[in-house]
């Protein structure tokens, strides 16, 4: 069906009710923080530039990584998973981008925007060339996210993930999770804490290996400072690039 604000809505009725509630609360919090502007979308054109500059740079680096590793010819098909307002597609001009998110967001003029669950992607097996997670890899359990990426990617396809909270061990990850939960409670959005999953980098490596990926690059980013610490977010964005091995 056509979503209320454009694009395709591929959620079932029960999932849509829960997604509507999440979308309302998530957007309200991001608006308060400065990520969402007058256009009511999580987008650099409306949000505070001091927040968006690092994320734009991280997505630009992911686009460069894709360009350097894409064998061509032709344009790669990229899933922008957890796409928010679909803004990252602007930084992938040489790819065909499909945005997927639980948010009921109005799509930009060019990329297709699909309302769907990142843990159950509405995409056939082995049909896309890259899966991009721009500050979204941590919004579902990492096992679910990586499993779904492995399912939809063609052999040789890439995972590119930037600006998600990653930690070197489970102790640091658990502390970050506690900080983020406290932040959501103080902000009045306690229910959002259940969707926030800071990542243990060693566990991520193991999950990627089990799913058939070769890790090309994994940087956890530098520790957070000042108000970012309340969310456990890195000052220098994390970066993951991994390639799906040929299936036997």
Image (cartoon, helix red, strand yellow):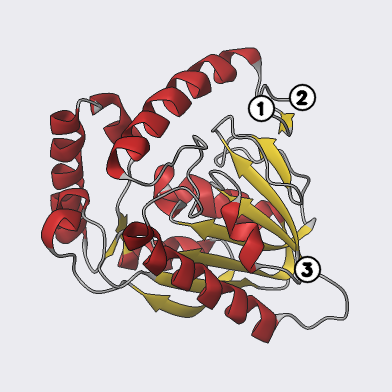
Name the residue carrying label 2.
2
Q: Please give left or right for residue 72 compared with residue 155 in the image.
A: right
Residue 65 position, x and y percent, is 59, 80
Which image quadrant is residue 242 in? bottom right
Which image quadrant is residue 201 in? bottom left
Task: Kindly identify the residue that appears in the image at 39 percent across and 32 percent down.
Answer: 26
Mark 3 or mark 2: which comes first in sequence? Answer: 2
The mark total stands at 3
Task: Kindly identify the residue that appears in the image at 44 percent across and 19 percent down.
Answer: 21
Q: Secondary structure at mark 2?
A: loop
Mark 2 neighbour density, 10 Å: few (under 14) some (14–19) many (20 or more): few
Mark 3 neighbour density, 10 Å: few (under 14) some (14–19) many (20 or more): many
Mark 1 neighbour density, 10 Å: few (under 14) some (14–19) many (20 or more): few
The residues bearing labels 3 and 2 have C-alpha atoms spaced at a distance of 25 Å
Residue 5 is marked as 1
Residue 165 position, x and y percent, is 31, 58
- Nearest to viewer (mark 2 / mark 1): 1
Front residue of this view, candidates 204 and 134: 134
Front residue of this view, candidates 13 and 208: 13
- Nearest to viewer (mark 3 / mark 2): 2
Which quadrant of the rendered structure holds the C terminus? bottom right
Q: Are marks 3 and 1 in contact (CB under 8 Å)?
A: no
Q: Secondary structure at mark 3?
A: loop
Residue 117 position, x and y percent, is 58, 35
Task: Kindly identify the residue that appears in the image at 35 percent across and 69 percent down.
Answer: 237
Which quadrant of the rendered structure holds the N terminus? top right
Residue 76 is marked as 3
Task: Please say whether residue 143 is visible from this viewpoint.
Answer: yes
Q: Is residue 102 above or below residue 151?
A: above
The residues bearing labels 2 and 1 have C-alpha atoms spaced at a distance of 8 Å
The residues bearing labels 3 and 1 have C-alpha atoms spaced at a distance of 27 Å
Mark 3 or mark 1: which comes first in sequence? Answer: 1
């Amino acid at each position: 069906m056509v979503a209320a604000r454009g694009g395709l809505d591929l959620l079932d009725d029960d999932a849509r009710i829960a997604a509507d509630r999440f979308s309302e609360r998530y957007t309200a919090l991001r608006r308060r923080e400065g990520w969402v502007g007058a256009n009511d979308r999580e987008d650099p054109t409306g949000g505070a530039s001091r927040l968006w500059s690092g994320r734009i740079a991280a997505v630009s680096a992911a686009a460069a990584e894709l360009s350097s590793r894409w064998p061509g010819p032709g344009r790669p098909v990229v899933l922008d998973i957890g796409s928010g307002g679909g803004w990252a597609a602007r930084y992938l001009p040489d790819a065909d981008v499909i945005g997927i998110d639980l948010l009921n967001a109005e799509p930009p003029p060019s990329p297709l925007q699909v309302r769907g669950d990142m843990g159950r992607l509405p995409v056939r097996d082995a049909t896309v060339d890259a899966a991009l997670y721009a500050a979204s890899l941590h919004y579902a359990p990492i096992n679910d996210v990586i499993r779904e990426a492995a399912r939809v990617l063609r052999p040789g396809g890439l995972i590119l993930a930037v600006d998600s909270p990653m930690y070197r061990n489970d102790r640091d990850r658990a502390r970050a999770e506690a900080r983020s939960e406290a932040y959501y409670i103080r902000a009045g959005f306690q229910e959002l804490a259940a969707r926030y999953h800071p990542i243990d980098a060693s566990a991520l490596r193991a999950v990627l290996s089990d799913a058939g990926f070769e890790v090309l690059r994994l940087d956890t980013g530098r520790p957070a400072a000042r108000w970012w610490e309340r969310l456990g977010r890195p000052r220098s964005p994390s970066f993951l690039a991994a390639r799906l091995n040929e299936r036997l």
